[in-house]
Amino acid sequence: MLLVFDCVVAGEANIDLLVDGVLELEVGKEKLADDCSVVLGGSSSITAFNLSKLGASVKFIGVLGRDIFGNYVRDKLVSAGVDVSAMRWSDTTKSGITIWHSHHKQRAGVTYSGTIAQLRASDITDESMRNARHLHVGAYYLLRDFHRDAPSVFAAAKAAGLSTSLDCNYDPSESWDSNIWNVLPHTDVFFPNEKEATELTGREDPREAARDLARYARTVVVKLGADGAFVVTPEESFHQPAIPSKVVDTTGAGDSFNAGYLAKLLQGGSIQECAQAGAEAGARCVRMIGGTAAFEDGR
């Protein structure tokens, strides 16, 4: 039987170790944390999980190591109803992990890339795109093996009739290129946050950055954290206010915004309805620890 998915999400899949109460480490000293949690991490995998929980049928394409972290990620995605049949498994590289240190709503992180960087354009096959309505790629700057052929993947998706979206995440090299400027013309929705948008364009004002980026991507949604989001389309631009929420943990808030936006887009919603749904999903996310906990069954 031919399976047709609302969305193929391709990108990184890893775990996050959240350490609360310690922001900075000091050489030669050991510090005690207030709490810690192991949760599903990765912009792409969090978006896939939450998008599935919001009612879309989702296929995930990524790379994991054959280890306890890889098994955890697979099991979490499957528990949300995400199809992982296209996951590629590595016998030689360990699954990635990000360790987030947080204190008083500030946080700093360190990532072991592992399999995160190993997604290739060839992993996103023509067959997978023929059986989908939308392609979303997350954490672009972490996907080093994907950069060279990324434009051809997005162009092929468009040629096959899919809509497309992209989230870049922060660029560890701080070059702010990696072929992304050749991907954006094939991108229907680009989801940078404020820092990423201003770094990409050299602008100080994220709204001006959004307008610059909209010369490349069709729609640009700059996520502004507690200030909501700023949206630029070929027809209009507008500010989407944030939804008031009790903030417990901001991990995955932007990825959840992506999921809410895409869920409404796949339902045929207007740009305003999509932005509102994104803000609602982001507000829902921050009420619990981790990027997916608030989207678990019954919550």
Image (cartoon, rainbow, N blue to C red):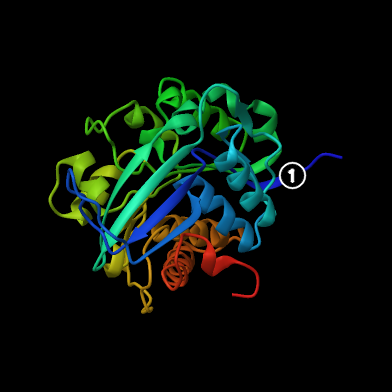
Q: Is residue 103 above or below residue 233?
A: below
SS for callout 1: loop
Q: Amino acid at mark 1?
A: Val
Q: Residue at x 64, y 34 (%)?
A: 87
Towards the viewer: 31 or 249? 31
**296 horizontally vs 39: left or right:** right
Give coordinates of residue 261: x percent, y percent. 49, 60
x, y percent for residue 143: 42, 31
Looking at the picture, tell me which residue is in the foreground, 105 or 17: 17
Left or right, residue 201 beside residue 38: left
Which residue sits at x=45%, y=30%?
Answer: 114
291 w.r.t. 174: above or below: below
- Let me know if residue 224 appears in the view: no
Residue ID at (20%, 49%) = 29
Q: Is residue 98 above or below residue 257?
A: above
Q: Nearer the viewer, residue 276 or 123?
A: 123
> What residue is disc 1 on?
4
The C terminus - image quarter: bottom right
Q: Residue furthest right?
A: 1
Asked whether residue 111 appears in the rendered view, the answer is: yes
Categorize mark 1 by other alpha carbons within 10 Å: few (<14), some (14-19), many (20+): some
Looking at this view, name the residue that lies furthest to the left. 204
- Give the quarter of the image for residue 71: top right
- The reply, left or right, for residue 59 in relation to residue 2 is left
Name the residue rendered at 48%, 55% in the picture: 38
Quadrant position of residue 275: bottom left
Question: Relative to the observer, which residue lies in front, 192 or 73?
Answer: 73
Q: Residue 111 location, x and y as percent?
A: 36, 40
Q: How many marks?
A: 1
Q: Position of residue 1 (x, y in %)?
A: 87, 40
